[in-house]
Amino acid sequence: MLLNYQQTKVKAGRIRKYQAILPNKREETIIAQKTKKSSSDNAKKIQWHPAFYAAAELELKENIEELDLISEYHLSKEPIRIDLLIIKEENADKVMKNEIGHIMRKYNVLEYKGPGNELSIDTFYKTLGYACLYKGYGKTIDEIPADELTVSLFREAYPRELFFELERKGYVLEEKYPGIYYVSGNILFPVQIVVISRLNRTMHSSLRILSANADIEDIRKFLEQTENMKTPRERNNIDAVLQASVSANYEIYQKVRRANGMCEALRELMKDEIEQDVARGEMRGRVEGIVDTCCDLGLPEDAILERLQKKLNISLQTAQEYLKTFGKQIVKN
């Protein structure tokens, strides 16, 4: 995934270079629109759903042994799938500890819309339809009681148009907890709509960092809260969440990983980048040392380039790049 980011970064660099030579405002606008679209397309290509499943497990970890989480549950032989189905065991606590789970009963249908995807009135009814189909496909009559079914819809951004349509149709929206809205009225099942960006930062960091514009404080909170999670299941979930979040927010994570106390999961995920930075730092030290010595001897730039080629066993072009990147300031001084 990090390789994909590098490719995107190169592409963005080309766009910026091309934009610099545009002769008029109209073409600048066209390029800006293309750049924005490219960024949006990149966010959509990121595997958000596996990260959401992992975040759901982390959110509900206090009750995880009582739950059976089934991703992309097939309702029939046709390609109709529930994003995430959560089934509580018979002896599970009646009320789950995480506030997202307070509404949940035995059978729980979850629909997730990743960054850039719309949560519309049609999505609302489609998800209710999934719940109805799930009940209807029981192996025996009323195997899945309607009063044991709930529906949860997740989206990062506030779904203003959906809420407007729901209220227009007579439904009542209640913000039961920050970012968690219960829907009541003429409705078959208990329904909640979770607006991820409005969730409590301390309680829901694993969901909040599933964003194309993650907040650095949310990232730090997530890394802090997951530092002591050591089971294979927990580590796999942490890695899945970070894979998506890092791919969408690479520059922010670069800042975070350079801070002291970076967590093991992030260190392992960005291992290649760390090694590259170490190698780059070592090379910088060698170049600066050679250039500094040459300047003390009063050697001209051509002689410095020759010395760099000989000492580092590099080409003239590479020596010029190193001098430009690492040593030019020394030469000027």
Image: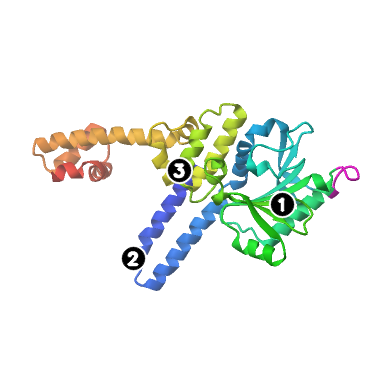
**Residue 76 visible, this angle:** no
Main SS, magenta residues:
loop
Task: Give the number of the disc on residue 21.
Answer: 2
Q: Is residue 195 left or right of residue 35?
A: right
**Residue matched to label 3:** 217
How many residues crowd mark 3 within 10 Å: few (<14), some (14–19), many (20+)? some
Distance (Cα) linking label 1 and label 2:
53 Å
Residue 138 covered by magenta stretch: yes
**Residue matched to label 1:** 191
Decide which of tag 2 and tag 3 comes sooner along the chain.
2
Q: Secondary structure at mark 2?
A: loop
Q: Which residues are magenta?
A: 136-143
Q: Position of residue 154 (x, y in %)?
A: 63, 50
* Residue that lies at the very extreme toward the left in this rendered image: 298
Q: Are marks 2 and 3 in contact (CB under 8 Å)?
A: no
How many residues crowd mark 2 within 10 Å: few (<14), some (14–19), many (20+)? few
Position of residue 225 relative to residue 41, above or below, is above
